[in-house]
Amino acid sequence: MDIPPEFSTRSDAELLRLAVAGEEQAFLLLYGRLKAGIFRYAFYMTSSQANAEEVTQEVFVTLLKESHNYQQDRGALAAFAFGIARNFVRRIEHRERPYEALPEDTAPATSSARLISESDVAARADDPH
């Protein structure tokens, strides 16, 4: 599929608008511009090709679904896309973090049951009140 030459001069933001409107060539060009950097970032952060591919895919799906959240006056689309990638990397890190049990309490026991000594229990048993 040939990408029209007029698309090559368009900004990433313009390509996103066109892609959301259904221009497949605009999406392909935008994908070509951003995918390598996003994949490298995700791979560096996760050390996993599968996770990097997942992040890259999710970034572009999110860009199409949530394009209304991008504000061109706040920065480049690439920065917005990398922010999305960062959020997906964090989710993966959270999802794949190994379960770690809470450490045992090493402080002296202070529960009320342990504060009463055996002699106190015996003394109370002998007390008629």
Image (tube, rainbow, N blue to C red):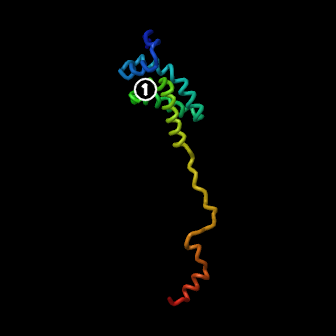
How packed is label 1: few (under 14 Cα within 10 Å), some, or many (20 or more)? few
* Residue for point 55% across, 89% down: 126
Residue at the image position 58 percent from the left and 77 percent from the top: 116
Residue lying at the far bottom of the rendered structure: 128
Most extreme residue toward the left is 21
Q: In the orientation shown, which residue stands out farthest toward the front?
A: 73
Residue 72 located left or right of residue 100:
left
Residue 82 point in image, percent of width and height: 51, 29
Q: Position of residue 119 (x, y in %)?
A: 61, 82
x, y percentage for residue 76?
Answer: 49, 23
Q: Quadrant of residue 62?
A: top left
Front residue of 80/6: it is: 80
Asked if 61 appears above or below 18 in the picture, the reply is below
Tag 1's secondary structure?
Answer: loop
The number of discs equals 1
Residue with the mark numbered 1: 71
* Residue nearest the observer in this picture, 128 or 33: 128
User: Residue drawn at (46%, 31%), measured in percent from left and top?
Assistant: 58
Q: Amino acid at mark 1?
A: Gln
Which residue is rendered at x = 56% and y = 44% of the image?
97
Question: Compared with residue 103, is residue 57 higher up or lower down, i.e. above or below?
Answer: above
Instruction: State which quadrant residue 122 falls in.
Output: bottom right
Q: Position of residue 43 (x, y in %)?
A: 57, 31
Quadrant location of the N terminus? top left
